[in-house]
Amino acid sequence: MGQYIVLLVVAAIIFVFILIVSFFRRYRRCPSDRILVIYGKVGKGIDTESRSAKCIHGGAAFIWPVIQDYSYLDLTPFSIEINLTSALSKQNIRVDVPSRFTVGVSTEPGIMTNAAERLLGLTQQDISNLAKDIIFGQLRLVVATMDIEEINSNRDKFLAAVSSNVEAELKKIGLKLINVNVTDINDESGYIEALGKEAAAKAINDAKKTVAEKNRDGAIGEAHALQDQRVNVAAADATAVEGENNAKITIANSDATRREKEAEAERKAVAAEKVSQAKALEEAYAAERKAEEIRAQRDKATQTANIVVPAQIDKEKVEIAAEAIAEQTRRHAKGDADAIFMKMAAEGKGIFEILSKQAEGFEKLVKATGGDSQSAVMMMIADKLPELVKTQVEAIKNLKIDKITVWDNMSGGKDGNSPTSANFLSGMLGSIPPFEELFKMAGMELPDYLKGTKKEEKKAKTNISDIEEIKPAKQSNKEDKKNDKKEE
């Protein structure tokens, strides 16, 4: 069973291979010297009618097996010799027109189809004979429409008429006229020969006439030439003499001009030499002046490099140092200012905290006194009373009584008392502001239990009078101390 399968596969492969090879072999390419004619079922043409063949020139096509086949038409031109004799012309004179026509299969689309329909399968000889018959008929027709003079003298017109008529008929069978060459034209009656003799005689007579005219013209021309020769010789002699004289004059003028120009040239040369010398001196002076200027510039540059540049450098150094010091001072001042600012900010913050706490304490004190702010102030003053008394005592506690000297004008004091140290001390104590006055200065009233009795008021008055008596001695003591300090 496996062998049959293998055989079937091999057979299928061989069949496919043969089919592919057949397809490739059916693809035909058309060479340039041939026309590929495909016939069979080739489709429809432009007029939707079935075509008899499909012609391809310079290409390729696939030839379907069974339904199509192909063949070639050769495009090689062939020559046909036409020996037309006894052709009747328009003048009823029979002429012989031997000629040669070159013909080939046309490659125009419509004409190729005509060739495929009428020439396919024919040999070249058969095609040549068919074309020969058509050419004979058309050539006789053209000769019958023209005179012998026209045929003989105007060959271009004759050939154009032959080409037009013959090519139109050859296209019907698929051929194209390539070239026409008429070798000679003769007639049986000798008319063309007589025309030739007439033309020859006319040409001979014209030539003889021309020769005689030329001989006459030659003799006349010779006489005129001799006359012109004599006249021209005489004129030439006169002109020669005149020319010699003019030449002598010209030579004399030329010599004078030459000498004049030589003198002018000499003068110009001397002047040019002097100008050159002056210019050379001027250039030398200019060069020396330029050299001096360059030397001065060099000296100036040297002085600038030795004096100005170091001074400029020192100046820049001083400026840089001053800028550095200023920058350092600015930074130091900025640091001090920042430190002072921070210190003041800290102190302000501390004072703010102290005042805030005092305000909070005062607020609580006012609340403790039932909202009476005056009572709250009185409590604060009562709290500070020991400190006030201590401050008043501190003012005189360090005084040494044995070192105090009192000067006075020896006049009796108030109440007839003499100035003594006791009076001085009493006056000092009296100079301390009483508590009642301090309270009044603060806008408050001292309580009655702190004001004292009348006896105390009397004693206070006595102390005040004693202190007033001691004041002059105190002032003199201050002046003595100032004098001592000045002497030191």
Image (cartoon, helix red, strand yellow):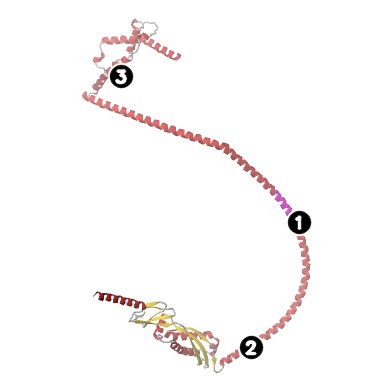
Is 453 rendered above or below residue 45? above
Residue range in magenta is 264-278
Amino acid type indicated by mark 1: Ala
Q: Which residue is mark 3?
A: 441
Q: Which residue is mark 1?
A: 263
Left/right placement of residue 121 relative to residue 221 reads left
Q: Earlier in the sequence, mark 1 or mark 2?
A: 2
Secondary structure mostly seen in the magenta stretch? helix
In this orientation, does residue 368 appear? yes
For mark 1, give the secondary structure: helix
Residue 270 magenta-highlighted: yes
Nearer to the camera, 41 or 333: 41
In this orientation, does residue 62 appear? no
Amino acid type indicated by mark 3: Met
Q: CA distance from mark 3 to mark 1?
A: 135 Å
Amino acid type indicated by mark 2: Ile
